Amino acid sequence: MRFPKWVTFILVIAATLIASSVDAAKKTPPGQRTGVYQVWAGGYYSGRGTATVKHKKLSIEIPVTSEAGGSGVLDASNLHIKDNHFSGNGSVMGHSVSINGRLDVPDGVGEEVQSARMVCNFECDDGHKGRIAGYLDEAQSDP
């Protein structure tokens, strides 16, 4: 039985976040969210790249391929972070893209969130949608 692409993507992201949470939990200080995140995009546009959080701004850069076989970069700079939510606009393969998401930070107790992670939805002006998820790369985080 074949699963739709979105089901496979959700399962891969869930497994990645669980695995990274267990590994990074010992190193991520409470409230830490600045630094470089390893992220994955899924949907019509998919790929792996980075997101950087610095000074209440988030930037995303992910080399992607489309289901039609094209390639390009999903790019969004200076997305405004308010509390733990962010939003803004970017571009992918000549299309504008709207992004809305959140950052989850460690609570210091290890019961809710054990390592910093991000998740967001994106929608392009061509009607295609997708999700981006990832975790804070401890080797590149800012204390």
Image (spheres, helix red, strand yellow):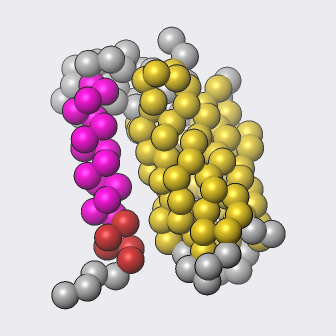
Query: Residue, x 55% and y 75% (percent of image)?
Result: 44
The x and y percentages for residue 126 are 70, 80
29 over 16 or under it: above or below: above
Identified at 46% across, 21% down, the residue is 139
Expressed as whole percent of the image width and height from the top left, the position of residue 138 reads 43, 23
Quarter of the image for the N terminus: give it: bottom left
Q: Is residue 9 left or right of residue 129?
A: left
What is the quadrant of residue 108 in the picture?
A: top left
143 to the left or right of 66? left
Magenta stretch: helix, strand or loop mostly: helix
Find the residue positioned furthest to the bottom: 1
Rendered image quadrant of residue 135:
top left
Residue 31, given in percent of the width and then of the height, sits at: 42, 21
Above or below, comparing residue 98 to residue 5 in the picture: above
Question: What segment carries the magenta color?
Answer: 10-25
Examine the rendering and report whether any part of residue 104 can be seen.
Answer: yes
The relative height of residue 132 versus residue 107 in the rendered view (above or below) is: below
Looking at the image, which is closer to me, 66 or 35?
A: 66
Farthest top residue?
Answer: 143
Is 16 left, or right, of 60 in this rendering? left
Please indicate whether residue 92 sits to the left or right of residue 68 in the image.
right
Residue at (80, 69) in percent of width and height: 94
Q: Is residue 19 magenta?
A: yes
Given residues 91 and 67, the one toward you in this image is: 67
